[in-house]
Image: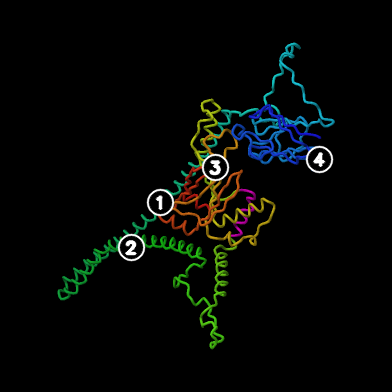
Amino acid sequence: MQRIVIRHLTGARANQVDEFSMAAVKELIIGREATASIRFDPDRDDLVSRQHAKVQQDSSDPESLQLVDLQSRNGTFLNRQRVYGAIRIHHNDVVQLGAGGPEFRLEMDPVPSGAARATRQASLDTLGRLGSKATREAWPSAIAGAPPAGPRAVGRGTVERMLGEAFGHVKRETNRLTWVGIAALLAIAAVGGGIRYYLRESATTQAAAQEQNIQTLQRMNEELKKNPAAAESMKQQIAKLETELKRSDQRHTATVQALLNEVEARVTQQEQMKVATASARVGGESPLTPNDGQISDASTPAVPDRNPDSSSAVPSGAMPESVKAATAELSQADAQTRNFTPDQINTAIGRGTQHAGQQLGLLLSDTASQLGQVLGMFASSQGTLQPGIQVSASGFQVRLFTPLEWIAQQASDAVGAGHSFTQGDVTNDMLRLVLRIQAIPSTPPDVGPNYGIGVASVAKVFVKDAAKKDEIDPESTAPFDYQNLQGLTAEFPLSEIAKLRESNPEFHVFVVGSDGGQKDFKVKKKHFARLP
């Protein structure tokens, strides 16, 4: 009976052999899990995923075998060529698990007919007797698609390019903020110029009025000299004019202050209306009308008393409990639908369709993690930093979604998977007035050693205000899988978020990992304003 022989060439299991019966095996799982058929050391072979790859029988030819990569982090290589999906494997083929990871040779016993024997390796003594120099091993990167035999240091040029990109991004952001500041200064200058013009015109008008009053006083004084009998009447008019002159400056100041008070009152009124509207929508109600500020009970139709003499009759103006429950359920669903117009929903669906298969929302990540990774790789390439030394950073990420942004994400996922997404696919749950926060687990980097980023799932998500005093827990959470780890989607009522941001529009999102670690993400006003 034919057997499968696995000869480990490198790694923690070098020089060990695993044997399996061809007839009894449908697939062999390769990885660091305890249940794996070909199991590697979970500590020393850390380039191998928990379920890295598998060897299975070819469905089209039971006598042949296939090597299948199970979406491993570091990749699977067959004879120095990276494997994507499934590929046929033959006798004496060499499999490597990750770039620089452990290698093993797959053999079949007995050897299938037509299979070539393994190449015999010449010893150094034999080469010396033949008078030939030992064959120089080519640099692994010269082989097309071949990964290096071990961890490769990042070159100076690569690190300089990465640092240049990082600093270039900072410079662009600084230039953008500079232009925004200049625009704000110009706007302030324009408003100041308008106020100055208004004050100058008012001063001109006031001076003209004072001049006219002085002329009137002079004319009245002359008439008084001519007609002493009208002295009492003239004195009253003079007193009135003097009072008017004293109050002219006060009226001007009061006019300007009244204008400022009116502007501030309108701004405050608009903010209060927004908060009241959001609170009314969260309660499943329509915003209050500006006429009376409340919803009249007359909007609920009364049920007429069809049988007044019967003891089971419904009193006039009352409604059966079953009808109340059905009406409340329909009113809540209708209120959720009225939160957004069809045009707003169509715009969100269009944005998701345009970015099909992409991750939307407001992404917040640890900048220290990215910069620490670059500096760590650079120091490692220069031999100044050992793998055991860590750069303090976190690998967690969060994405924030408002209801319209959540609808756009659902459209992006559907279209990316080859499905259509229309308004008919929008559910009442998508329209709920909640802020959804997706916390992504902390995972190792795709390239280079794991400097300072601990692998951990997400255990908890909560929100605090800008002063980190008031805390909000999510009303609901839902876990999701991410690279063999667990993330968390937490939902917070928008009304609670609005109350949290009343004194300061900035707030903090806290992510607690399964290992006890915690990361604080600050949500700035300008970033949160980008969400629809």
* Residue 62, disc: 4
Q: Main secondary structure of the magenta part?
A: helix
* Residue 255, disc: 2
| Cα distance in 3D space between marks 3 and 4 | 41 Å
Q: Amino acid at mark 4?
A: Pro
Q: Is residue 403 magenta?
A: no
Secondary structure, mark 4, is: strand
**Badges 1 and 4: C-beta atoms under 8 Å apart?**
no
Q: Amino acid at mark 2?
A: Thr
Name the residue nearer the viewer: 110 or 345: 110
Q: Crowding near pointer 4: few (<14 within 10 Å), some, many (20+)?
A: few
Left or right? Give the position of 202 relative to 60.
left
Image location of residue 316, percent across then percent down: 51, 83
Picture residue at 48% right of the left edge, 46% below the top: 521
Q: Crowding near pointer 2: few (<14 within 10 Å), some, many (20+)?
A: few
Comparing marks 3 and 4, which lies closer to the viewer? 4
Name the residue nearer the viewer: 1 or 141: 1
**Magenta residues, start to end:** 345-358
- Residue occupying the far left of the picture: 228
Give the mark nearest the N terminus, 2 or 4.
4
Q: Crowding near pointer 3: few (<14 within 10 Å), some, many (20+)?
A: many
